[in-house]
Image: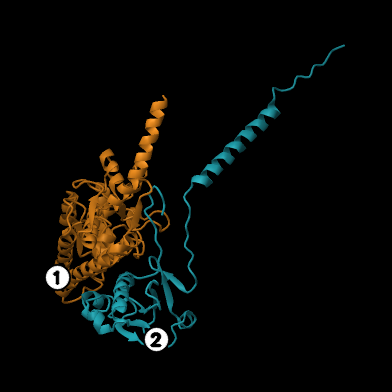
Chain colours: A cyan, B orange
Amino acid sequence: MSRIQVVRPAGAGHETLYVLLASLLIIILAATIVTMRGERVDEVALASHQIDARRDLTAAEQGLYTDLLVAFDEIQALREENAGAPSIDTLVDEGLPPFVTDASSESRGRHQWLWMESGAYLGRSQDSTVAGSFLLILPQTLATPADVWLRHDSATLAPADLGSEALIGAGWKQIATHYDAGVTREHRH
Amino acid sequence: MLRSALARRVFSLLLACALPALALADSGKPLRIGITLHPYYSYVSNIVGDKAEVVPLIPAGFNPHAYEPRAEDIKRIGTLDMIVLNGVGHDDFADRMIAASETPDIKTIEANANVPLLAATGIAARGAGKVVNPHTFLSISASIAQVNNIARELGKLDPDNAKYYTKNARAYAKRLRALRAEALAKVTEAPDASFRVATIHAAYDYLVREFGLEVTAVVEPAHGIEPSPAQLKKTIDQLKALDVKVIFSEMDFPSAYVDTIQRESGVKIYPLTHISYGEYSKEKYEVEMKRNLDTVVRAIQESRA
């Protein structure tokens, strides 16, 4: 009588299982490390009535927008000194771009600036293919940041209402800007 | 044993008594403000006047594009009260120095915090639009925005002198505005769309934007990396095809291949300065920026001649 001895393969089934488990462990470990140390994607969400200062403006508009923000600092200082918003003439006398007429304003759309009693400076573009019309709304308080709106058609009428809803309805877009620190910095700020 | 423990205790007690006196003496001293790049030395010096001392983090003569922190420079951070940073890519070495210093939690001022930034161009434009052009200091408007910002933040940290800083910042801003106005006054006729500009480095977008211009092409793949002969040929063909009228090159980092471009493409080359070389001084920014503005004006004028 022959004795049949069953010789099991040297753990083939187990080996496959162990290899799979080890692979899974490596994948989980790698995924955890990547999730923990990977670069964060700080996407800045824009509202539908906003446009991004870096991506959505023409070169002329980017220049004008920077000038407006700088002028805004000076306007706030003048408001504090004189208890009232400075007139366009005062801003021109101070030599503040974009209110002055020079070679730069010529090539950026020849905006005509006017002060609106409702509390804003309106810059009407004379060449909307180069740059749209701008609206700088002065905030009630001195510590609030500037609020700048842009409209791309040339036939811009002075908005009667400076409320966000009315401006959005009239086709104005609010310019939004955000800060991105250097990508190779030790601590992202 | 017992005696040494007692001596230690007496010493600590004496030290504790002396500390408030030390702190008082400290607050009477002018602030020491660290800066990383030449333009920021000029900005901060003009804002603080004699109320604070401005200390460069890296000594004059080092190229900030290729700077590796040295032990003595890191040590100096321990003597500072705060540091003003470009923060958007031109002084990324500063964070590593601060982290390694005796005062890793030192107060920093992000000069560009509310400056509208432009996206980086060329090879630096990686990272889904998050990489920005760090050369905001090469524009008068973006410089004034930074000066105002630094003065505001300094005022928060040193409220006693806040008004003084604001006053100085406004006076400085006015002088900078005058520089720009003076240059623009010489451009009697605004350049039209056919006036196309290329630059060697992707550094001058902010500057040419003040003249209502846009950079059409950037020649160099990255700072200090010279294009290969094949790339150079492609660039020259591109410059011809784009009908570029002038190229702004780099005064501080001259390269031989720039001459080849001029010879082969026939496009006139005008050197601009990066303001990142030589001695630190209060006047440096105004002097060098005036030269840059004059160069751009000359390029516009000669393109018509």
Of A35 and B154, nearer the camera is B154
Disc 2 chain ID: A
- Quadrant for the N terminus of chain B in the image: top left
How many C-alpha atoms fall within 10 Å of the one at disc 1: few (<14), some, or many (≥20)? some
Q: Which mark is residue A118?
A: 2
**Residue type, label 2:** Ser
Q: x, y (%) of residue A94?
A: 22, 77
User: Label 1, on which residue?
Assistant: B301
Q: Nearer the viewer, residue B125 or B133?
A: B133
Chain letter of mark 1 equals B
Hey, what amino acid is under mark 1? Gln
Q: Residue at x 26, y 64 (%)?
A: B143
Tell me where residue B167 sits by quadrant. bottom left
Q: Quadrant of residue A17?
A: top right
Q: Are marks 2 and 1 on the same chain?
A: no
Residue furthest to the right in view is A1
The image shows residue B83, relative to residue A179, as above or below, that is above
Apparent side of residue A139 relative to residue B28 in the rendered image (left or right): right
Residue B170 in the image: state x and y as whole percent: 24, 69
Q: Residue drawn at (33%, 85%), measured in percent from left and top?
A: A115
Q: What x and y, as percent, mark residue B188?
A: 15, 76
* Residue situated furthest top in the rendering: A1
- State the image coordinates of residue A128 (x, y, percent, origin top left): 34, 79
**Mark-to-mark CA distance, 2 and 1:** 42 Å
User: Which element carries disc 1, helix, strand or loop?
Assistant: helix
